[in-house]
Amino acid sequence: GDSVTQMEGPVTLSEEAFLTINCTYTATGYPSLFWYVQYPGEGLQLLLKATKADDKGSNKGFEATYRKETTSFHLEKGSVQVSDSAVYFCALIGGSNYKLTFGKGTLLTVNP
Amino acid sequence: EAGVTQFPSHSVIEKGQTVTLRCDPISGHDNLYWYRRVMGKEIKFLLHFVKESKQDESGMPNNRFLAERTGGTYSTLKVQPAELEDSGVYFCASSRSGRGTDTQYFGPGTRLTVL
């Protein structure tokens, strides 16, 4: 079945550091890929998505590129801020499905 | 546009009791989903409604869980009787279509603790 593997946290960075959170997936067909973020005390919010190979999703300075050859969708940001502290979830919807399959989540803490 | 809302935000109950969680989707979203995150595990799909019809309830853990969506508007998820392993955060999401490329918008979740 479909699965998502993302790097285990927690990840602690200083402000303005470069961020990478690795995400790889296994899926049948051609999945759509997502990054969701959960800020403290809030629900899940869609951060970005990509629906076909080589697409790049971007939002709020975050980027992720759909790499079919490596089955990856790594999240990157060039300069993190304290306000980026949150839990980040990589997810996919496989083929003609509609169920989101999530990774375990990565807790990011950014210190001033 | 109001987002997905869930009630209550927290619930603490004793084993064997009944709890009902409510979800109000974004207006006009025919598709409604329930997911659950048990401590330390992934967020898992529970079920999917299209309007008032259950399209897929393959993720429901067992028959102690009952979901309804009367009139195709809000949805309830009842756990009866609750067990310790039911503790976790229950998320509701909605989308306009059921296509895989369509964004699912999540509510803040209900944290359920069964003692």
Image (cartoon, rainbow, N blue to C red):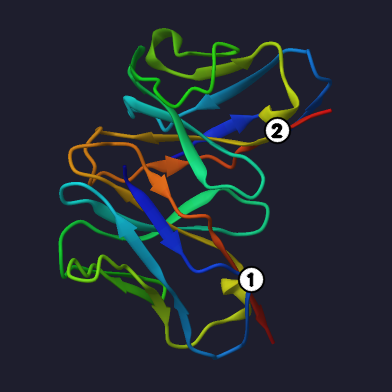
Query: Do callouts 2 and 1 mark residues in contact (Cβ within 8 Å)?
Result: no
Would residue B3 be seen by someone viewing this image from the given angle?
no
Look at the image and tell me whether residue A104 can be seen: yes
How many discs appear?
2
Task: Classify A76 as above or below A24.
Answer: below
Residue B37 in the image: state x and y as whole percent.
Answer: 58, 41
Q: Nearer the viewer, residue B56 or A15?
A: B56
Instruction: Give the letter of the chain under mark 2.
Output: B
Q: What residue is rendered at 70% in x and 33% in y?
A: B87
Q: Which residue is mark 1?
A: A10
Please tell me how crowded label 2 is: few (under 14), some (14-19), or many (20+) other residues with Cα within 10 Å.
many
SS for tag 1? loop
- Vertical position of residue B85 compared to residue A11: above or below: above
Q: For mark 2, what is the residue?
A: B87
Residue occupying the point 61% across, 88% down: A15
Question: Residue B89's image quarter?
Answer: top right
A19 vs A8, nearest the viewer? A8
Question: Which quadrant of the figure has residue B22?
Answer: top right
